[in-house]
Image (cartoon, grey):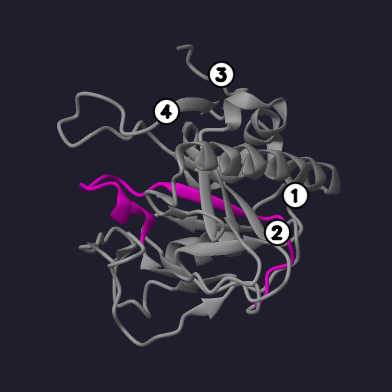
Amino acid sequence: MLISPEQIQQFKKDGYFILENGVTEEQLEALRRECQRVVEAYEAEMQTRDATNTAITHYMKRYFIDNRGNDTPVITDFLGSDLMADVCRAVLGENAYLFNEQYVVKAAEVSTKFGWHQDSGYIGHYHPPYLLCWCALDDMTIDNGTIHVLPYQRAKMAPEDLFEHKPEEGTRDMIGYYGDDPGIPILVPAGSILVFSSRLFHRSGSNTTDVLRRAYMAQFSAAPIMNLKGTKLHSKAIPVLKNGARIAPVWPSG
């Protein structure tokens, strides 16, 4: 998919751009099927452990389910697709690494919001910004708790700025913005992709509809992101783009 100069300029200026209907119908249906399987397996796992929450996941309310890409060719194929390579090449350059990937699911008729944060605020130390591709698996609306974004200038920040984040009592959400700007709601049809920087402030509302609100998020970096001491990877660094050429992601063994 051709990423326009105007979209790249918006990314540099505001921290994001939108690819409407970027995901094909075939990819969309496959990701939805995998989402159902992953959620059912995760709920069963939490029931077995008698767990009500894991990090920022809350049972029967909202799920952040990561590291499932190695379980299925559906996710592997999507992460290694021309689409993801085109976005990475346009934003990150000739080399890119898969940093993380996860399903983000909000349960029906549950008032669980997600507070203002930068994804970089969850890393715990300064690092170069990375790229996020938030793929809407459902039509996104105010009612089902879509993402709201806060462009750089409205957050009074530069693209590299990383703000201090503090945990919110009760949810474990890391909060980094306390202003009164409501942000811009991302109201897009299923199959659209919100492409944004890990420095962009964003939040989401509650899902008050009677169905799940589902998204799949892939995260990429221009270089491996290390821990604070620089001795090991913070998460993953699986090559997906090398010297501009697409590479099928290969998960490390063990």
Q: Amino acid at mark 2?
A: Ser
Q: Amino acid at mark 4?
A: Ala
Q: Earlier in the sequence, mark 2 or mark 1?
A: 1
Quadrant in which the C terminus appears: top left
| Mark 1 vs 4: CB contact within 8 A | no
Q: Which residue is mark 2?
A: 192
Circle 3 — which element? loop
| Mark 4 vs 3: CB contact within 8 A | no
Q: Is residue 246 visible?
A: no
Q: Amino acid at mark 1?
A: Val
Q: Earlier in the sequence, mark 1 or mark 3?
A: 1
What's the residue at 72%, 32% (across, down)?
Answer: 74
Q: Which residue is mark 3?
A: 250
Q: Which residue is mark 1?
A: 23
For label 1, count other residues whose C-alpha is less than 10 Å away and answer few (under 14), some (14-19) or many (20+): many
Q: Which residue is mark 4?
A: 237
As drawn, the residue found furthest toward the right would be 26
Coordinates of residue 233 in the picture (x, y in percent)? 31, 28
Q: Earlier in the sequence, mark 3 or mark 2?
A: 2
Q: Amino acid at mark 3?
A: Val
Coordinates of residue 181 in the picture (x, y in percent)? 40, 86
Coordinates of residue 2 in the picture (x, y in percent)? 70, 49
What's the residue at 48%, 71% (across, down)?
Answer: 113
What distance separates the C-alpha of mark 2 from that of mark 4?
Answer: 25 Å
As drawn, the residue found furthest toward the top would be 253
* Residue in the foreground of this view, choosing between 111 and 239: 111
**Magenta stretch: includes residue 99:** no
What distance separates the C-alpha of mark 4 from that of mark 3?
Answer: 10 Å
